[in-house]
Amino acid sequence: MIYHEKKDFKKSLASHKKALFHTQKISNTNPLSITEKNNHIIKALIYDSQLNQAKTQLDQVKNIVFSGKNNYDLKNTKNDILVEEYLTNSILYHKKKSLIEKKDQHLDSIKYYYKQLDFFHDKLQERTLNNKSNQILAEIGYSFYERYINDLENIFDSNNQQKSFELAEKNKSRRLLEKINIQNTSFKKIPDSLFKEEKNIVNQIISNETKKNTAHDSLKSKISDKIFELKREQEKLEKLFKHKYPEYHQLKYDTKISSIKDIQSKLSTNQSLLEYFVGDENIFIFAITKDIYIVKQLKKDFPLKEWVENLRNGIYSYWNNKKGDLDEYNKLYRKNAFNLYHKLINPIKNLLTEEVIIVPDAELNFIPFDALLTDKNDDKSYLIKDYQISYNYSATHYLQLLNGKQKKTTKSILAVAPSFNKKAFDYESLLAKRSDLSNLEYNIPEAKSVSALFNGTLLESNHATKENFLKQAKNFNIIHLSTHAKSNDAMGEFSYIAFQKETDSTSINDSRLYVNELYNLDLNADLVVLSACETGLGELKRGEGVISLARGFTYAGAKSTITSLWSVNDAQTTKLMESFYTNLKEGMTKDKALRQAKLDYLNNENLNAPYFWAGFIPAGDMSVISSNTNYWCWIVGIIILVMFFIFNRKRSKKLR
């Protein structure tokens, strides 16, 4: 491996041959063990341009992996890793031959093996029921997709651009897409009892995982055993669905990727969509408008992760604790805000319309694009002044939201605001934050104001419990949670939002709603606003995105969310939220309402650094808030008016 990295392929080849010799002695000519070493030798031979020997070895590996069959049976293989390596080496071999011989037949072979490898990855995902195993597959798949997209864009003609986009979409929010697929389809042939059993097992797994997270060490082993047994039951049930109801299983795991034409048909002339794919060596930007589609490739020759971290530190580090030099933090922010704009937006800015939908990837999930700077010499040249920005987990997810069933709710808004007894340090300060479960001065007035504006329901203080929220949440079109929250960047499923602690409660879990608990909720909300700290943050997983509260509420059924990217300021958040809801009630789309609230804040407030306004981001379906809560009221009202009119008319005829 070291020799390969140094590009000393002859020493690399000698090293792998030596390893093969020892393996043959130890494994007693076990063909699979030997084949694993052979795959490494083949790669070294290809890089050392010993292509005839490489081809001979490839044929030998093929006979072992596929049991001597001429066709590739990728559904039933002896060893998945060997298949992956064989197909990858076949691509490398034909790429090398193509460079030397310049023949189309090698390009055709490269395409063929890429398609085989793509199909193989799909089948692996479909038959792997364990979430951790699926995550490992997603990690492996991401590197493969980067290579595939790179070759489609650089080796083949422009007819492959739809395929490039499909690959970029494939590993984005897969689990989320599966949930929405099921939500939007009815399965009359499957007994309700099986769905209830499936949900019950999931609930028990979630409950035990939550207990384990806060349990004493002496109890964790017993809880782990219970979780193991429950997951075995879950796998048995999944196998039953797969064999007895294959159409359900297929729909659940074979997510159809939206085409570029499908997306363009839903975009207005004033909208553009930017989807990012962040690989190890390249960043691909897929830019789509109503009439245009282009792919822009950037070499990842700059420290993206470092720039994002510096941007965020420059925005909030000083205001979080009022320590350090504010001017130095501002310089850090300005430098990285412009650098990120220059790399991520500037290359495609000529295509952008006023409304921009961003599908981020990797570290880009943590960037408040509103606060990027378009001019390195102007610290007020915020991107929000030029564009109305919203976010989505994937383009396919965006279309699923737009095309999904219209949900019916009976009530307008549920506003929730617990009270907390713990005193914050410097509590009276305007810099008090919605973190550390300290007391909040402004969250209850905020919830009252929002509730009154929409004539909604308010749960405050002792009524703002987790139990009360879970009982009522599914009935509301808008959910507003004005409280504390905490992200968990190591175990995203255990990020939580805080509710009122009940007096007789013995567990902290009774007042915390975790992300993994949201996965089994069924909400009907058009909009969920998480007016709390870090609700858009969490564990970053390749192929899924950020496992956050925002994602959890989306998974639970929310069509759109507004969440935060850092520990937000209590007082200034209330001002921003009241302005946002006023704009929303006036009939603005959600992204426009939030953008206007931010611009008004910038123009009217003294504390107008990005820390105070840029943290909240809108994601999902940005349509004007639906009025289905009053749907039946309007119908009944119209019927009564019509009946009253008919009755009066008959009465007047009689009087005549």
Image (spheres, rainbow, N blue to C red):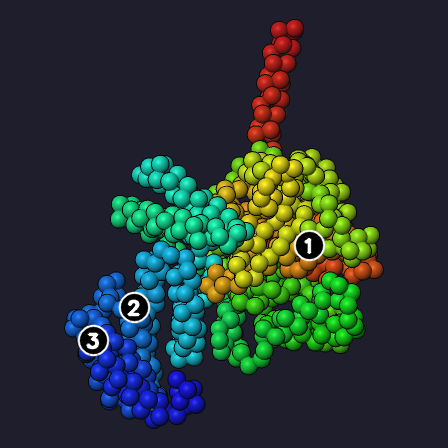
User: Please, what secondary structure does the residue beneath circle 1 have?
Assistant: loop
**Camera-nearest residue between 19 and 121:** 19
Q: 10 Å neighbourhood of mark 2: few (<14), some, or many (≥20)?
A: some
Say if mark 3 contacts mark 2, CB within 8 Å: no
* Left or right of residue 514: residue 52: left
How busy is the neighbourhood of tag 1: few (under 14 within 10 Å), some, or many (20 plus)? some
Whichever of labels 2 and 1 marks the residue nearer the N terminus, that label is: 2
Q: CA distance from mark 2 to mark 1?
A: 46 Å
Coordinates of residue 603 in the picture (x, y in percent):
80, 59
Please state, as top left, top right, bottom left or bottom right, where the N terminus lies in the image: bottom left
Residue at (60%, 39%) from the top-left corner? Answer: 505
Is residue 32 visible in the rendered image? The answer is yes
The amino acid on which the numbered mark 2 sits, given as a three-letter code, is Asp
- Relative image position of residue 135 (x, y in whole percent): 42, 62
- Image coords of residue 592 (percent x, y): 67, 53
Q: State if disc 1 and disc 2 touch (CB < 8 Å).
A: no
Which residue is identified by label 3? 30
SS label for mark 2: helix
The three-letter code of the residue at mark 1 reads: Asp
Q: Residue at x 22, y 83 (%)?
A: 25
Give me the disc on residue 80: 2
Label drawn at residue 436: 1
Please tell me which of labels 1 and 3 falls first in the chain.
3
Pick whichever, 214 or 627, lies toward us: 214
| Kind of residue at badge 3 | Asn
The location of residue 317, given as percent across then percent down, is 72, 67
Task: Between residue 145 and residue 224, name the one nearer to us.
Answer: 224
